[in-house]
Image (tube, coloured by chain):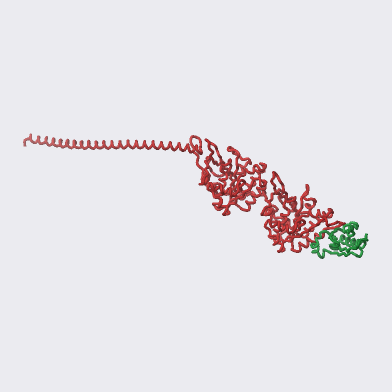
Chain colours: A red, B green
Amino acid sequence: MASGEGIQKSPTGIEGFDELTLGGLPTGRPTLVCGSAGCGKTLFASTFLIHGAREQSEPGVFVTFEERPSEIVANVASLGFDLDGLIEDGRILIEHITIDASQVAEIGDFDLEGLFLRLELAIDQIGAKRIVLDTVESLFSAFTNQAILRAEIRRLFDWLKDKGVTAVITGERGDGTLTRQGLEEYVSDCVILLDHRVANQVSTRRMRIVKYRGTAHGTNEYPFLIDEDGFSVLPVSGLSLDHHVYDERISTGVPDLDAMLDGGGFFRGSSILLSGVAGSGKSSIAAAFADAACARGETALYFSFEESAQQAVRNMRSIGIDLGRWIEAGLLHHVAARPTFYSLEMHLAIMLREISRRRPRLVVLDPISAFIDSGDPLEVQAMLLRIVDFLKVEGITGVFTHLASSADLIETEAGLSSLMDAWILLLNREASGEFNRELYLLKARGIAHSNQVREFLMSEAGLRLLPPYVGEGVALTGAARRAEENRERRNEASRRDEALRRQREVDHRRRRALAQIEALQAEIEADEAELDALVRSEDDYARQAVSDASGMVEARKGR
Amino acid sequence: MSQEPLRPIRLTLYVAGQTPKSLAAIRNLERICEEHFPGRYAVEVVDLRTAPHLAREHNIVAIPTLVRELPSPMRKLIGDLSDTEKVLVSLSVNEA
């Protein structure tokens, strides 16, 4: 194996943990996992061991001082691990060491060489590279001579190091100290503290790397989760800052809204806030976003903090959006959780984990305001900042809905506006005895967009945005708009009638004039004909007169 | 002390190699047995270093460990058996 580059690390197979520690636990060294009862120490240790046996071809020994081997097998079976199979293959060995203090009398000096011999036997039997000791506290309760125990525990850690096995030793948390004896943390190369805290009746599991000799590590507390997928640590910070920047535009799923955005929708990877009062159509637009993403063949992830998946599918069907088919096709994942179900950071952690696993192109959080009540505003803002950042880094389009408490409120409690690339404001305004939904594009970074307040209609045919009636210095919506439009229509009709009438009148006059022109023309022609005739007869007369005169002259000469 | 009806005592002493503790335990046990249970005891010394699987079989953790196989119930003593009184009390073979 490569050396020189710091210490070797053994992956634990615990989601998130290996990333956090840049590789896992220190290879060939003892790690202490401490915490109070029920915080997941044994699960951490089992996952480490099973991962080693299954994925890393590193056989492991599970030394249990408390639970019976059959109980351990049953416990991990519920997480989908076939421990029996691994035991049969000789890749895992469970060594059950029981010490019943009531049966044992201590007389004089002793040591734990028997334990060492048994560990050695077990390690050599399967060629173990990993070992778990769960939990060493049991030894302290079994023997009364604590001075010997302390010396022996110290020797045990050294011995494990000499053996070169990667060890996980679990320990109960003491009062004000990491462990009851205040000893193990000093002799371990790596100390991991698991914690289980309850605040506002919501419990959160947290993990902290207290110490890790010879390597850099995050010192923060990280939430972790134990669920059907086992143990996963959820690192929520330490993200790189190279954002993807997309020029590609994606449809909002509402053609009229796309049209307001210079024709093409929002930029991929942008964060879009939909804020509005109750019933203003936030979820519907969010669903339209998801629908459009799935229609493009992309995957979408919908986190709902109010509705279940079935509810959302049914409700969205009423506005012509069929989310059910996308869920069936595996393109849309709907994750529903009550805000109070987890603590804030746990929610964040779960969301980040889901996003990392499913790798969607679009994520909807509906609504983010659900968190505002469940925590300190600063924490909420920090959490949302993290998720927005995370989505940005991953180039995932984020759609966030926010329930505004007042219609006039053009600000969000969590101070989100600066985080968002686009902000769609949904209004539900009362005018002349009716509420009308309106939509306004408050902000859309980098996109020329309409400044109009549009009327927002939801029907079986889908979502539509109607241009408002604009006239006499006001924009009108709803019945007022329709009334105004009707009045306009009536005005228009009468104006059209009037125009027609005038046209006909003019036409008539024109035709009459034309007729007159025709008559006069005829008159002129008649006059001209008469004049012609007169001229001709005058000429004849003149010619006759001349010839008559010359005839007279001839006659007078008498020739 | 030895007026009781003589019941056979079978003891197993688990040690690990020739460590001072192990040797002390062997010495102490032999002395105690000779003094207090002459003729009715049987001691087997098991060196776990040569047979470590026996540690697993008999669930031995501490060294030295003395196991009273007979009379039953089984009892375990750990340590170098340096306190004779305590050993006798713990073995409690003189009680009914």
Residue A438's quadrant in the figure? top right
Quarter of the image with the N terminus of chain A is bottom right
Q: Position of residue A4 (x, y in %)?
A: 73, 57
Q: Position of residue B5 (x, y in %)?
A: 91, 62
User: Between B18 and A215, which is closer to the camera in this rendering?
Assistant: B18
Q: Is residue A198 visible?
A: yes
Residue A427's quadrant in the figure? top right
**Residue sitting at the far left:** A558
Q: Is residue B21 left or right of residue A408?
A: right
User: Between A428 and B94, which is closer to the camera in this rendering?
Assistant: B94
Q: Position of residue A470 (x, y in %)?
A: 49, 37
Q: Is residue A118 left or right of residue A272?
A: right
User: Between A483 and A382, which is closer to the camera in this rendering?
Assistant: A483
Asked if residue A487 is positioned above or below residue A340 in the image, the reply reads: above
Q: Is residue A262 visible?
A: no
Q: Position of residue A289 (x, y in %)?
A: 56, 48
User: Which residue is depicted at the point 33% across and 37% down?
Assistant: A507
